[in-house]
Image (spheres, rainbow, N blue to C red):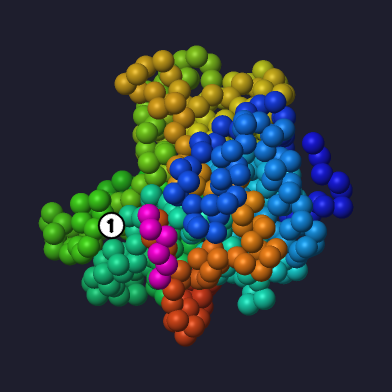
Amino acid sequence: MPLPTSTLRTGAIASSGIQLQPELPVCQTDLPLDWYQSEFKPYAEEYLALPDRKPGTILPWLDGYALPALDHFGPALLLLAHFYMGGEIVKLVERYGGKVADSYALALQASRNPEKSIIVESAVHFMAETIATLASPEQQVYITNPKAGCTMEMLAKEHMVAPVVDQLLERYGDDLAVVAYMNTSGRIKAIAGRTGGAVCTSSNAHHVLARVLSERKRVLFVPDEHLGRNSALKLGIPLAQIRALPSPERWRSSFSLREIPGGPASLDDARVLLWGSYCGVHTIFKPAHVEYWRARGYRVLVHPESPHEVVALSDGSGSTDYLWKAIADAPSGSRLSIGTEGHFVRNAREQAALRGVEVVHLADIPDPTLSSRGCGCATMSRNDPPHLAGMLDLLRQGKAPSINRVLAGDVVDELSGARERLGDADRATLVVDARGALERMIEITEAAARA
């Protein structure tokens, strides 16, 4: 059911290739009505009353809100979604001329498309905030559901990270820099900028880490312990020079380096210090999963947020963009087992099957002690069709809720939706530091691509 050409938008991100098939049901789980903001409940009530979840039913309903918004804003509107979104949002966003990509490409969209004054993102809050940090003052960034957070980022809030950074800076001074993974708030990215570090994504973490380590004696990598370890080992850094801090799950308010066995001095030989957070989607994977599929002739590819023993056994590891391209480029007859978020693998499985390529989820094996049935990112999936319909319609009416507008430095409680927003002066300072760390990542990544 293609849209008229006049409604389509162009951009630097290529189409994912995901296609809507009218009779296939939409598998995204319906949210309870009380999960919706009051402004979005009328749209949710209409959606929940639809007789089924097939595109042939959902699309005419969604068209009633999306097409008027597209006509109203014209080329000023840009819709974005992450690969991990439920396949339904991915397909719907592209249907309306939007773009689907990994976190690195999404971060660049405001700065690379200055003509887009209204940007609507269906993903998690830190991604929308990153887009807003790089946006111009004339661009407005909205998220379809501000309570769409990230469990990894929840274990690396500013009040947790900043005191530890202060202690490390007191001990090491300018010898220390922070590398902040994209899965952090703008406030953590600003810490990276202030310490001479940079932001990174899973696609460029080793390049960023190598550059910063060439300038400083040691790095604190925040927040994903596994990506940090995998990136450091990829650079040839000995395991003895990589040290993980205690898991923040054990101390959510304050932490002293004196509590580490051996005290602060035990960190002095480390070149890479790892914050102890993780992604629950990727830490389900075990070596037994890899061995099971390898024994059956499958090529195993995993995301580097997976534990190192899984990455070491696999045939390859990389970002969502790496994984999507590997699947798209696989010749007919290929058999691939993919270790990443479940919605991503389901979308990939559907598209690969059209080309004679078999894709399975790494954890979907007939062993009840190991199978997870393809864990999906639950917080990402808080963005659903009613949120997209409501956001577009409310924007068109000039009634978009303030909570859905995203500015750099915003902190949103993932359960209540309560927001803490910086004042103009503090936000301006944060933008300088966070944008500096982001722009440094871009410079390092583009330099690596040219090399």
Indicate whether 48 appears above or below 357. below
Q: Which residue lies furthest to the bottom in this view?
A: 425
Q: Give, as a single range, the part of the protein colored magenta.
A: 415-420
Q: In this view, does 226 lie to the left or right of 243?
A: right
Instruction: Mark 1: give few (<14), some (14-19) or many (20+) Cα within 10 Å.
Output: many
Residue sitting nearer the eye, 51 or 381: 51
Residue 328 in the image, given as x and y percentages of width and height? 68, 33
Q: Mark 1 points at which residue?
A: 270
Give x and y (percent) for residue 387. 58, 51
Q: Is residue 122 magenta?
A: no
Q: What residue type is labelled 1?
A: Ala
Query: Residue 414, percent across and down?
Result: 40, 56
Q: In which quarter of the image is the C terminus?
A: bottom right
Of residues 277 and 9, the one drawn nearer to the viewer in this rendering: 9
Quarter of image, res 320: top right
When asked about the image quadrant of residue 395, the answer is bottom right
Residue in the picture at 74% in, 55% down? 12
Seen at 30% across and 51% down, the residue is 276
User: Is residue 16 visible from the viewing direction of this image?
Assistant: no
